[in-house]
Image (cartoon, grey):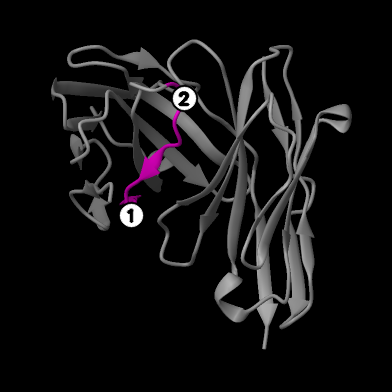
Amino acid sequence: DVKVTQSSRYLVKRTGEKVFLECVQDMDHENMFWYRQDPGLGLRLIYFSYDVKMKEKGDIPEGYSVSREKKERFSLILESASTNQTSMYLCASSGRDRGVYEQYFGPGTRLTVT
Amino acid sequence: AQKVTQAQTEISVVEKEDVTLDCVYETRDTTYYLFWYKQPPSGELVFLIRRNSFDEQNEISGRYSWNFQKSTSSFNFTITASQVVDSAVYFCALIVSGGYQKVTFGTGTKLQVIP
């Protein structure tokens, strides 16, 4: 079974802090994604990566950066956290070797910025 | 650009009733893939089904069934004899061929099954 893990289920940070959210997958997937989920807005893509050291902006990249130094790990960075970044953050991964594949999701990190 | 619409924001049914969750999509691509995901209260999205644009055959898996109709750009999901464990938010999603598998999600339908 595919397993995607995220470093924290719940996180509370203060405004202005630098925040790191870590995601690890164990299925050797090429693609990894970071989403945020807010009530009424569904899932919105922040960034994705299709290979090590490669990244692409999603729909709402402002205020975020990412890092992918190893294939299994994809980090989301909030350089200076703000209250409007309070949200549920979901990481996902998918394979590419046989065509289009469904994404597998981690359990999510509920981030509160005070 | 792609778009997925789930017009039903919330649905409540009594246990054992059948329920259909609607999904309408928009894309100009001829090759695309449709998905349904379930998000229980625990928060983790769970993949349920994938369908490609060339396969309009309906699918049944236990109490779940999916109806894909290209003529109406719809990919509806029916739960037969609903159970309390079906209570969750359900997302419909779309990927077009090519690119990096960027997914377009609908806004989700929250299903509450009342015992």
Amino acid type, label 2: Val
Q: Is residue A113 magenta?
A: yes
- Expressed as whole percent of the image width and height from the top left, the position of residue A85 reads 39, 39
Q: Chain of mark 1?
A: A
Amino acid type, label 1: Pro
Q: Nearer the viewer, residue B103 or B52?
A: B52
State the SS at label 1.
loop
- Expressed as whole percent of the image width and height from the top left, the position of residue A55 reads 29, 14
**Residue positioned 29% across, 36% down in the render:** A81
**Residue positioned 24% across, 35% down in the render:** A16
Magenta-tinted stretch: A99-114
Q: Is residue B13 left or right of residue A93?
A: right
Q: Which mark is residue A100?
A: 2
- Would you call the spot at circle 2 few (<14 residues within 10 Å), some (14-19), or many (20 or more)? some
State the SS at label 2.
loop
Q: Nearer the viewer, residue A41 or B46?
A: B46
Q: Which mark is residue A107?
A: 1
**Residue positioned 71% across, 83% down in the render:** B15
- Expressed as whole percent of the image width and height from the top left, the position of residue B42 reads 41, 66
Q: Is residue A15 magenta?
A: no
Q: Residue furthest left?
A: A70
- Disc 1/disc 2 C-alpha distance (Å): 22 Å
Q: Chain of mark 2?
A: A
Q: Give the quadrant of residue A65.
A: top left
Q: With respect to residue B38, does A95 lie above or below? A: above
Q: Is residue A114 visible?
A: no
Q: With respect to residue A9, does B24 lie above or below? A: above
Viewer-nearest of discs 1 and 2 = 2
**Residue positioned 66% across, 68% down in the render:** B63
Q: Is residue A92 visible?
A: yes
Q: Is residue A51 left or right of residue B40?
A: left
